[in-house]
Image (spheres, rainbow, N blue to C red):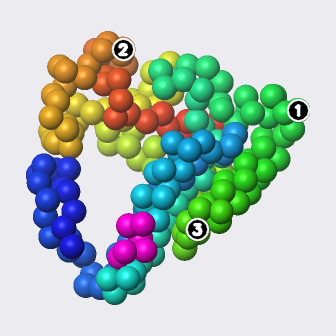
Amino acid sequence: MQLYNSATHKKEAFTTHTPGHVEMYTCGPTVYHFAHIGNLRSYIMEDVLEKFLRYDGYDVNRVMNITDVGHLASDADTGEDKMLKGAKREHKTVMEIAQYYTDAFFDDCRKLNIKTPDVVQPATGLIDEFITLVSGLLDKGYAYVAGGNVYFDTSKLERYYVFNDHDEEDLAVGVREAGRIQYFPIFHYFVLSAGRKP
């Protein structure tokens, strides 16, 4: 089997770290509302890949997250958390919203014959681990605080842009002040906030 390697920009033979075994992580839904057909397309593609790997004889361990906290309404890191927004909309608690739309998501998956991953992990179950991870990034200088959020410092990775054909100047749409001026791309960033300061 050959897969496209985003780092080398070419198709390459698929190999694994452990012969015959695949550790596979795929992003899961943010469970504040129903998934739409565009969302489900991604899960169908992931499911097809996993099923082919199993058909080809690999032992596959697939992990999927459920984002039930910490996803802001705007990709510009403004607005309220999508889960809080959903709770206000439906006059329910955040956890009620999360459970309802998690169940709805997997009901959609069953209708589309999408296999449930081996491990499904809600974000709320790993808050302490997130805080440890983010604190470590801050301590090592790989992240910084701005506007009450924690951001990964892309300038610390020499090959950060290896997965696309752009460079820092192409993607920088502004700068952030965090003891220094830094360019920050419009995408390829994540907001690490979980309701608690690291």
Q: Which of these two is toward me, 197 or 29? A: 29
Label 3 Cα neighbours within 10 Å, binned few <14 / some 14-19 / many ≥20: few
Q: Which of these two is toward me, 92 or 192? A: 92
Answer yes or no: do the residues labelled 1 and 3 have beta carbons within 8 Å? no
> Main SS of the magenta segment?
helix
Q: Is there any visible trace of residue 166 in the rendered image?
A: yes
Instruction: Confirm whether the magenta stretch covers residue 179.
Output: no
Disc number for residue 113:
3
Q: Where is residue 10 in the image (x, y as percent from the top left)?
A: 11, 54
* Of callouts 1 and 3, the N-terminal one: 1
Residue at position x 56%, y 66% in the image:
114
Which callout, 1 or 3, points to the residue nearer the camera? 3
Q: Is residue 8 shown above or below 162?
A: below
Question: What quarter of the picture does the C terminus occupy?
Answer: top right
Residues in magenta, as a range: 48-53
Q: Mark 1 points at which residue?
A: 91
Q: Position of residue 100 (x, y in %)?
A: 78, 50
Q: Name the residue under label 2.
A: 177
* Of callouts 1 and 2, the N-terminal one: 1
Query: Could you give the CA–CA distance between mark 3 and mark 2, rounded to whole angstroms?
Result: 48 Å
Which callout, 3 or 2, points to the residue nearer the camera? 3
Q: Where is residue 92 in the image (x, y as percent from the top left)?
A: 87, 38
Amino acid at the residue labelled 2: Glu
